[in-house]
Amino acid sequence: MVGRGGGDDLHPAQGGEEHPHHLECDARTDGLLATGRRGTGPVPDLRDIGSPRAEAVAVRWRSLGLLVLVLAALAVAYYALETKGTLSGSDANRLFQAEAKDVEKISITRGEELIVLKREGDGWRLIEPVQATADVSEVASLLRTLLEAREERRIEEAPTGLADYGLERPSLHLSVTLKGGNTLPALLLGDVNPNGRSVYAKRPDQPAVFLATAIVRVRADRKPDDFRDKTLLALEPNEVTQIELVGKGQSISLSHAEGKGWEISKPIKVRADAAVIGQLLWKIKDARVTAFVGSGPDAKRRYGLERPDLIVELKDAGGVKRLLLKKAADPQVGLYAMTEPGEGVVTIDPAFLDSVPNGPDAFKQATQPASSSP
């Protein structure tokens, strides 16, 4: 048996006493051990166990274990501090108690600026500070965030000062109005807390300061244009029956008849290439606004769209839509665009104008049907 390091129990060989089970290292056994060790390096001496070297290793392991325990204790303490006062995820802690289908209006005050989004049919409309169609996906994302947000942790029931939380002059004031005119309790948002995951918040009529998830501020702290629909011209390519292109020094008329397909009716009368026309219509449908630059009765004149570089007129079952395009004097600005009916002047990718086929030959079908003999 091997004795405990540092104890009184000595290995018989160390005590110099005889032991019935002690193996004598005669020449025969030493040869066998040497054979077993050949090529494997020295075999540790059993007498090293319990030596000062082994004891030092044990001390180091004990120190490492204590360090791990200390770090674990610190982690637990930090978690306890962070979660102290954390509320449960029940609906009772939701900041806005409502269902999405019941919300009629969302109001956001950013400093002196008021943004109001109002439900309109199946979509949403921006009614303050300008009248414009809203981006349905942006509003839906904002609304979902507001309705899922909860009070995460109560910070102070009666703070002596709100400046420490950025709530003396809140960066955002949020309110939600339901169908029927009932407005839910408003929410004020201040600074993001040090860990960056939450934002300080409070109710206007209550002193308590609490934490809410920072995503609420991220979704709500937007400029009015961020909530606007970026679609240049809403259309369904397969429903367009007539196209008129005026500009680039000429006028081209294209028409589609059931059973006949597309044809050029002006300035020549020939069969048109349906693929080329389809590409043009899809480019118009996919075009996106890069900036909203002007509105009002004089916007058309101010941006030179009274004399556009190109007019694209489209007709479908819903009526006629016109797209006016004008290159900006500054290439960095891009391409001015305006739709009629529409909501002002915008800019789009300047490459759009160059992508429009130029001249009737660009629309001609490569192979024309043979003309019938008289």
Image (cartoon, rainbow, N blue to C red):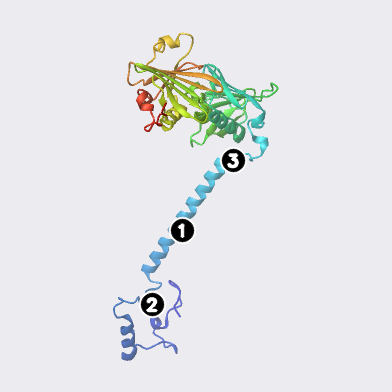
Q: Residues within 10 Å of mark 3 (few under 14, many from 20)?
A: few
Kind of element beneath mark 1: helix
Q: Is residue 48 above or below residue 206?
A: below
The label number, if any, that marks residue 46 in the structure image: 2
For marks 3 and 2, the one nearer the N-term is 2
Q: Which residue is mark 3?
A: 84
Kind of element beneath mark 3: loop
Kind of element beneath mark 2: helix
Looking at the image, which residue sits at the far right?
180
Left or right for 244, reference 199 = left
What's the distance in space between the residues labelled 2 and 1, CA to CA? 26 Å
Give percent across and percent down for residue 223.
Answer: 49, 22
Looking at the image, which residue sits at the far front?
374
Left or right for 284, reference 201 = left
Q: Amino acid at mark 1?
A: Gly
Quadrant hosting residue 20: bottom left
Depth check: give the residue in front, 50 or 122. Answer: 122
Q: Amino acid at mark 2?
A: Leu
Q: Which residue is mark 1?
A: 65
Give percent across and percent down for residue 257.
Answer: 50, 27
Q: Amino acid at mark 3?
A: Lys
For marks 3 and 1, the one nearer the N-term is 1
Depth check: give the residue in front, 128 or 155. Answer: 128
Please report the residue visible at 49 percent of the width from the left and 25 percent of the height from the top: 226
Left or right for 38, reference 222 = left
- Specify whether residue 291 is in view: yes
The label number, if any, that marks residue 238 in the structure image: none
